[in-house]
Amino acid sequence: MDSHDQRAMSLYGMPERKKTGSELADLINSKIAAGQIVPASITVRLLREAMESIKSETGNTKFLIDGFPRSEGNVTVWD
């Protein structure tokens, strides 16, 4: 596990792609292995879940997501 994963895990729990037996992890890992981009709908879903978790634990409602959205398609998935 690299340092980024360790930091994310300490802040937010196990990264989805590292979970064994998870259908979503299998899909994410297959896309990465094939050199493809993980669909925006999955990325946004995971971001929303993480943000809701942080909001419920800390009350924080402001987030800066560096490098996202990267395309118009990433923007429209939020709607």
Image (cartoon, rainbow, N blue to C red):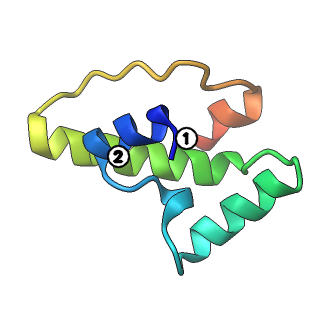
Please indicate whether residue 73 sits to the left or right of residue 14 in the image. Answer: right
Task: Give residue 29's position: percent from left, percent from top.
Answer: 70, 60
* Residue 78 point in image, percent of width and height: 55, 39
Vertical position of residue 35 compared to residue 21: above or below = above
Image coordinates for residue 57, horizontal then vertical, percent: 11, 44
Relative height, residue 34 to residue 44 (above, below): below
Q: In which quarter of the image is the C terminus?
A: top right
Q: Residue at x 52, y 60 (%)?
A: 18
- Which numbered circle lies on residue 9? 2
Mark 1 nearby-residue class (10 Å; few <14, some 14–19, many ≥20) = few
Q: What element carries label 1?
A: loop
Going from N to C along the chain, the mark reached first, 2 or 1, is 2
Q: Which of 76 and 15 is in front in this view?
A: 15
User: x, y (%) of residue 47?
Assistant: 45, 43
Q: In which quarter of the image is residue 77?
A: top right
Residue at 35%, 46% in the rendered image? 9
Tell whether 30 sits left or right of 66.
right
* Horizontal side, residue 10 vs residue 16: left or right: left
Q: Mark 1 points at which residue?
A: 79
Is 73 located above or below residue 12 in the figure? Answer: above
